Amino acid sequence: MTVKHLKAIQFFALTGLLLLASCGGKNNTDFSNREVSFNENWQFYLSKDSNDTIIDKSQARTLNVPHDWSIELPFDENSPAGIGGGALNGGLGWYTKTFKVAEKDSTKITSVVFDGVYMNSDVWVNGHHLGNRPNGYLGFEYNLTPYLNYGEKENEILVKVNNSKQANSRWYSGSGIYRNVWLKTTDKAHVTQWGTFITTPTVTEAEAVVNLETTIKNEYPEAKELVVTTTLFKENSEIASISKKINIAANKQQNLVQEVKVNNPVLWEVEKPQMYTAVTQISLNNVVVDQYKTPFGIRTFTFDLKKGFLLNGKQVKIKGVCLHHDLGPLGSAINTRAIERQLEIMREMGVNGIRTSHNPPAPELLDLCDKMGFIVMDEAFDMWAQSKTPHDYSNYWDEWHKRDLEDQILRDRNHPSVFMWSIGNEIPEQWSEKGAEIGRELSAIVKAMDNTRPVTAAMNPPIIVNSDEVSIQFQNTADKPNALAASGALDIIGYNYAHQTYEKHPVNFPKVPFIATETTSALATRGYYDTKSDTVKMWPKRWDIPFYDGNPGNTVSAYDQVQAPWGSTHEATWKIIKKHDYLAGMYIWTGFDYIGEPTPYQWPSISSYFGIVDLAGFPKDVYYMYQSEWTDKTVLHIFPHWNWKEGQTVDVWAYYNNADEVELYLNGKSLGKRSKQNDDLHVMWRVPFEAGTLKAVSRKDGKTVLEKEVKTAGEPAQLQLKADRETIKANGNDLSFITVDITDDKGVFAATANNEIHFSVKGNGKIVGVCSGDPVSHESYKGNSHTALNGKCLVIVQATKEAGTITLTASGDGLKENTISINTISDQEE
């Protein structure tokens, strides 16, 4: 739990008491235990046989969840998951935990809530089977009450996680209880799971009408008269409140609609995402027995045929990225700080949109998008009834898709960051009438639960016009809309790639707005460069043919010059999107590299090349192209490194903005000025290598704007350590991400160094991840050493629950040892 979450609990415990005075109720509890972490002290056992029917407790180890067991395993060329799944095995895992429930809670309802278990989980408590959930991406809740022991007698919960049937995903999924678990205690009269729905049907500068729909359940054996009071808060201030009496029959639930007006609302915007909170209290016999908090935002938006996306009446171009759910070296085990760091890195690039490809995200991601101001496309499925891999979700489609989609909408519909629902990604059925039928069914399910947001789908290019080249690349396209696009199920036409057709959208779909659901698929290895940058390479040649004709070491040039056959370079697609208002925006594939799907290569590559940022979180060069285009920051970025062989000719690129020109100098001699022409997004010089200093100067109206230098490094000699945060919380979860740079003896960055670096840690923390961003590395992400990639490596340390200091030491053969200290503080110290 983050510091922000802890402070929110403290705040609402206080405001809950204040609210009682206004509604005349007495305090039954402070409700701080309504939902508490159930993450600690699980026993875990990974079966040696996928047919095991019982856990071998003698072989179990103690750990905390969230936990991903696959990330701990060695990379395996023969893994049934394949390189698409990161060459990491799944298997059958068992988790068990003992716990006590206080006697005073015997009159209440006690439930266990899982935010996500991958995959096919079964849960028992005290030997009673509670249920099975195949979907690995959605949360679920089980009522434990009928089977519990109270007082000093212990209870045992057992979770079986069956991820043995692979491949079941087209990328790395992770395995285990990889999201948070909660123990929930409520009165028998309570707000149900995801039981509120807040909309703002009318918003003006002077007033916003806030509509609150609350589902309340009475699990008493007799009817009850309840008073429901909902109070709205903006930060620490109460701004409105409303109460209503209701009568609910025994063991029934009822929906209550309330309406509150907010004067002078502060709207949720990308730049300033103002959040409100609704606190709903249920009183029984003048005693408050339940309290439920719902964060929300007030905003208006529309997707317009001519102006693209309008937020609060203002045109906003969606500058988005697709993100898979893994967190690089942490695997799929959710950590709030790790997600926050990813979003911070994206925000610095200028990103304002996230697509949750291709599954419902962790709740923490949407909480952070709410607070940080991202435009989210919330996606449900990567496949429907027709499979993409042998053991994927299609095997459960008929029985589970309606329930799973409904649960996703219920869970996520109060998030102001969520602006559209995607019902599928590149679904095979899109080409048949079956796809139209399923599309209409899914759209109807969404609209029945939330009619405030549009429905889209990430289709393959649904129509091709006047482009023989594109028709060759997309062999399943047609000269008319595919069945899903023509079904009427979609409020927004979304499709992946085919940027050559974007400008034809008003002709092809004159009545439906557009979003580029997935774009680009350009490839790069951070810090590696081909000697010539002015040719665009298509790797692989075709999506369905293995590729063996690349670079030594399975590298890809980091100039923006390599693309997948279905995609484009980064510059090519952005030039089109930025040009036309009616193109609402784009979601680039991808913001970060991810484990698995190592296009264009085969083994030994095991992670992706698509990211604008590598697996460790280090930006590739094209990051700065977007930063120069998508932000107001003044940017000047020159590359590549300047460690080459005498006689080589090297292409030097510069991304810049807020300037008229850039002049390049080599060892003090001018190599000429360059200015972007027409729609250029970079400038280039072809330079014979000469050791020394390469310097770029950007100027506007003849005055210097920025200067940047790249120097030739000597032999690797030192390690420089820099933490993203030098003070973190002593809560057992918080992280510090420490970048390790290799330099020469003068401190010049050694951009081609690939030394192995060893780590040790003392004090109040531990190492939980190491990574260099190398897609070919088979070193464990959970080790205490790692080989740097092109001068850089990452080590992640996690705090214990005891405040103090973490001291990390880094060393390597021929390298001067270095240390860094991270302070860990208690919540009271902040």
Image (cartoon, rainbow, N blue to C red):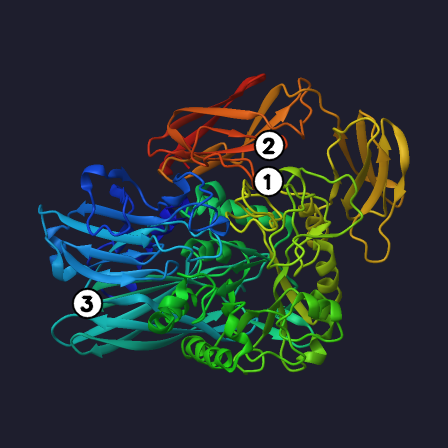
805 on left or right of 771: left
Is the residue marked by circle 2 packed among few (<14), some (14-19), or many (20+) residues within 10 Å?
many
Percent position of residue 459, x then y: 57, 70
Is there a contact, CB below 8 Å, between mark 3 and mark 1? Answer: no
Judge whether 524 appears above or below 310 on screen. Answer: above
Could you say which is closer to the camera, residue 643 or residue 410? 643
Q: Residue 353: name its quadrant.
A: bottom right
Q: Is mark 2 on a helix, strand or loop?
A: strand
Badge number at residue 718: none
Q: Residue 635: name its quadrant.
A: top right
Judge whether 20 appears above or below 611 on screen. Answer: below
The residue carrying mark 1 is 618
Amino acid type indicated by mark 3: Asn
Q: What element carries label 1?
A: loop
353 on left or right of 529: left
Judge whether 618 appears above or below 722 on screen. Answer: below
Q: How far apart are marks 3 and 2 (CA)?
A: 62 Å
**Residue 802 shows in this picture:** yes
Q: What element carries label 3?
A: loop
Nearer the observer: mark 3 or 2; the answer is: 2
Could you say which is closer to the camera, residue 224 or residue 62? 62
Could you say which is closer to the camera, residue 348 or residue 359? 359
Q: Distance between the residues labelled 2 and 1?
A: 8 Å
**Residue at (74%, 67%) from the top-left corner?**
469
Amino acid type indicated by mark 2: Lys
Is there a contact, CB below 8 Å, between mark 3 and mark 2? Answer: no
Could you say which is closer to the camera, residue 627 or residue 430? 430
The residue carrying mark 2 is 792
Q: Which of marks 2 and 1 is nearer the N terminus?
A: 1
Is there a contact, CB below 8 Å, between mark 2 and mark 1? Answer: yes
The residue carrying mark 3 is 286
